[in-house]
Image (cartoon, rainbow, N blue to C red):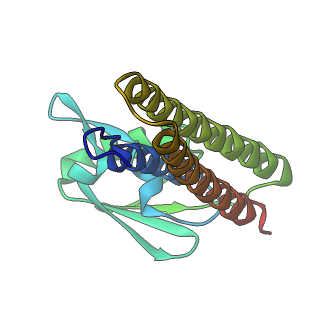
């Protein structure tokens, strides 16, 4: 490979890993019938005149597999946190116990499980699209480098390298999807 022409493979890998990380973040927002502290990450509480993430007004714990507890630090905020959780669309109904809100995680029915598995597929397809866009950017870099004097042999080596990292990223996305769908469909 030519030393004077540089294709930034590290940047491409980083961007592909970012697509995978985004998919994993999307997966954590799905309620699978198991308790997870990250399921409340998107919940915003009306606190002190502004919208605040729940983890900035309370401690979120998972004391058992089907229960999340939210320990609100300021007693005056308990009602606001309760309201934020109820209206979040997660389908959770907090039970107040002083400063602590207990969130029992209900079982998912079969129809809801299938819906969520389908949503996982959508998230993974979005990640694959992002990876393919990064691949296209890498191939565009190679075309530009070819115009700047890259040899055919070097071009082929770079194309193979980009295709290999693309295939690896797609394989990770598929494995993540399969694992999440299996988790959702467990009874």
Please provide percent x and percent y for residue 102: 45, 63
Is residue 95 something one can see in this rendering? no
Residue visible at 27% across and 53% down in the picture? 55
Please provide percent x and percent y for residue 123: 61, 40
Please provide percent x and percent y for residue 141: 40, 30
> Compared with residue 144, is residue 104 higher up or lower down, i.e. above or below?
below
Q: Is residue 70 left or right of residue 186?
A: left
Residue visible at 51% across and 46% down in the picture? 162
> Compared with residue 177, is residue 179 higher up or lower down, i.e. above or below?
below
User: In front: 7, or 1?
Assistant: 1
User: In front: 149, or 66?
Assistant: 149
The outermost residue toward the right is: 110
The outermost residue toward the bottom is: 64
> Compared with residue 37, is residue 173 higher up or lower down, i.e. above or below?
above
Q: Is residue 166 left or right of residue 113?
A: left
The part of the image, by quadrant, that contains residue 129 is top right
Please provide percent x and percent y for residue 100: 34, 63
User: In front: 62, or 181?
Assistant: 181
Residue visible at 55% across and 37% down in the picture? 89
The part of the image, by quadrant, that contains residue 46 is top left
Is residue 130 something one can see in this rendering? yes
User: In front: 25, or 16?
Assistant: 16
Image label count: 0
Q: Quadrant of the C terminus?
A: bottom right
Q: Is residue 5 left or right of residue 107?
A: left
Residue visible at 51% across and 43% down in the picture? 153
């Amino acid at each position: 490979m030519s030393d004077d022409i540089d294709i930034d493979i590290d940047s491409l890998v980083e961007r592909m890993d970012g697509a995978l990380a985004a998919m994993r973040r999307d997966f954590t927002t799905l309620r699978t019938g198991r308790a997870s502290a990250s399921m409340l990450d998107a919940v915003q509480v009306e606190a002190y005149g502004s919208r605040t993430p729940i983890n900035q007004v309370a401690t979120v714990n998972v004391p058992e597999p089907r229960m999340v507890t939210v320990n609100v630090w300021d007693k005056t905020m308990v009602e606001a946190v309760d309201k934020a959780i109820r209206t979040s669309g997660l389908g959770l109904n907090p039970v107040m116990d002083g400063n602590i809100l207990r969130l029992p995680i209900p079982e998912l029915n079969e129809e809801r499980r299938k819906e969520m598995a389908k949503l996982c597929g959508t998230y993974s397809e979005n990640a694959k699209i992002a990876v393919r866009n990064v691949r296209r950017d890498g191939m565009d870099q190679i075309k530009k480098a070819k115009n700047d004097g890259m040899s055919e042999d070097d071009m082929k080596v770079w194309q193979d390298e980009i295709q290999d990292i693309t295939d690896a990223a797609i394989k990770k996305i598929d494995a993540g999807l399969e694992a999440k769908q299996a988790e959702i469909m467990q009874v």
